[in-house]
Image: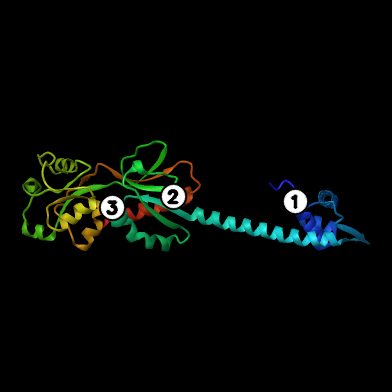
């Protein structure tokens, strides 16, 4: 395909010579010598089998065949230049589009409400969110970076810790008002809401000095946001992650029972491939996340 097409340099030399009517001036425009332009024109004449220029004094005048070809070549070069410019714009746009894989709980509780602030600070970056429920589902063919809660794992990916997460008990304002003298040791007497995927209460019990193992009864929730909603609905006491509980606490839907917190079993990480052309954009997003997360949790 396109075997009969001459090199682009040959077409540019012909177009410049046709437009300027002078091989020397065409060479100056293209940073080529007079002889180089002459050689390109002869090569094109041999390829087309037509005489393209005739000498008129010191000028090179197009023949009828040359004029027809010059117009076609000029249009073709213009179309090629436009296509390359459009391709460059598309590549630049793609480089600024950041596809972020994130768990639904983190997206709804924290990231989505704050994306407007990110766009104001980084108007050159467009965010495209993709919900991922498990890290094993992550496919970097469809995402540039993932925001994930857990532990640094697969060494084939780059992990950047965004937040050292903590856990603490929360309840509805009504429950707190009804039990003003409650102590950590009293908690096993009340309904303790449980998260399906981790043994969450035991580490906090240890930190608080409560001699009680992991609760074996009480409601179980598969989504950490449902756990918070249940606590807000006065169904029991939930052990909340600080990051996810931020909005519930700020709105007064839940309150902290005590000032005691324990390290969570996991932390929030950004996960990305080592070999990526979007490293700069990812770093900007990570820096913003880390700063906003630190600011938000410091206010609690």
The Cα atoms of the two marked residues, 2 and 3, are separated by 23 Å
Task: Looking at this view, name the residue that lies furthest to the top.
Answer: 155
In the displayed structure, does residue 96 sit left or right of residue 201? right
Residue receiving disc 3 = 105
Circle nearer the N terminus (3, 1): 1
Q: Secondary structure at mark 2?
A: helix
The Cα atoms of the two marked residues, 3 and 1, are separated by 57 Å
Circle nearer the N terminus (1, 2): 1
Q: Nearer the viewer, mark 1 or mark 2?
A: 1
Residue receiving disc 1 = 9
Residue receiving disc 2 = 283
Q: Mark 2 touching mark 3, by CB under 8 A?
A: no
Asked if residue 36 is positioned above or below residue 116 in the image, the reply reads above
Give the residue at x 40% y 51%.
100
Q: Position of residue 79 (x, y in %)?
A: 67, 59
Q: Nearer the viewer, mark 2 or mark 3?
A: 3
Quarter of the figure with residue 267 = top left
Q: Secondary structure at mark 3?
A: helix
In the displayed structure, does residue 44 sit left or right of residue 181? right
The Cα atoms of the two marked residues, 1 and 2, are separated by 40 Å
Q: Secondary structure at mark 1?
A: helix
Q: Position of residue 262 (x, y in %)?
A: 20, 45
Give the residue at x 10% y 43%.
217
Asked if residue 21 is positioned above or below residue 151 in the image, the reply reads below
Q: Mark 1 touching mark 2, by CB under 8 A?
A: no
């Amino acid at each position: 395909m396109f075997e009969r097409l001459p090199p682009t340099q040959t077409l540019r030399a012909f177009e410049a010579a046709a437009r300027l009517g002078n091989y020397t001036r065409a060479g100056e425009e293209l940073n080529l010598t007079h002889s180089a332009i002459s050689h390109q024109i002869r090569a094109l004449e041999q390829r087309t089998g037509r005489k393209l220029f005739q000498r008129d004094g010191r000028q090179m005048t197009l023949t009828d065949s040359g004029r027809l070809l010059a117009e076609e070549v000029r249009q073709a070069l213009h179309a090629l230049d436009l296509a390359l410019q459009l391709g460059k714009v598309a590549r630049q746009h793609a480089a600024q589009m950041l596809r972020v894989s994130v768990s639904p709980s983190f997206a709804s509780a924290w990231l989505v409400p704050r994306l407007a602030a990110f766009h104001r600070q980084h108007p050159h970056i467009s965010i495209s969110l993709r919900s991922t429920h498990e890290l094993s589902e992550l496919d970097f063919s469809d995402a540039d970076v993932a925001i994930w809660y857990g532990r640094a794992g697969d060494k084939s990916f780059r992990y950047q810790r965004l937040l050292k997460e903590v856990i603490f008990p929360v309840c509805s304002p009504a429950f707190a008002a009804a039990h003003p003298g409650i102590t950590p040791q009293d908690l096993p007497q009340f309904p303790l809401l449980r998260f399906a995927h981790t043994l969450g209460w035991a580490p906090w019990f240890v930190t608080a000095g409560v001699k009680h193992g992991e609760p074996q009864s009480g409601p179980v929730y598969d989504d950490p946001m449902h756990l918070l909603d249940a606590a807000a609905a006065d169904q029991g006491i939930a052990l909340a992650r600080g990051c996810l509980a931020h909005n519930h606490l700020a709105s007064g839907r839940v309150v902290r029972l005590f000032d005691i917190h324990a390290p969570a079993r996991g932390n929030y990480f950004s996960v990305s491939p080592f070999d990526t052309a979007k490293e700069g954009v990812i770093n900007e997003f990570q820096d913003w996340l880390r700063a906003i997360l630190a600011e938000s949790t410091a206010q609690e």
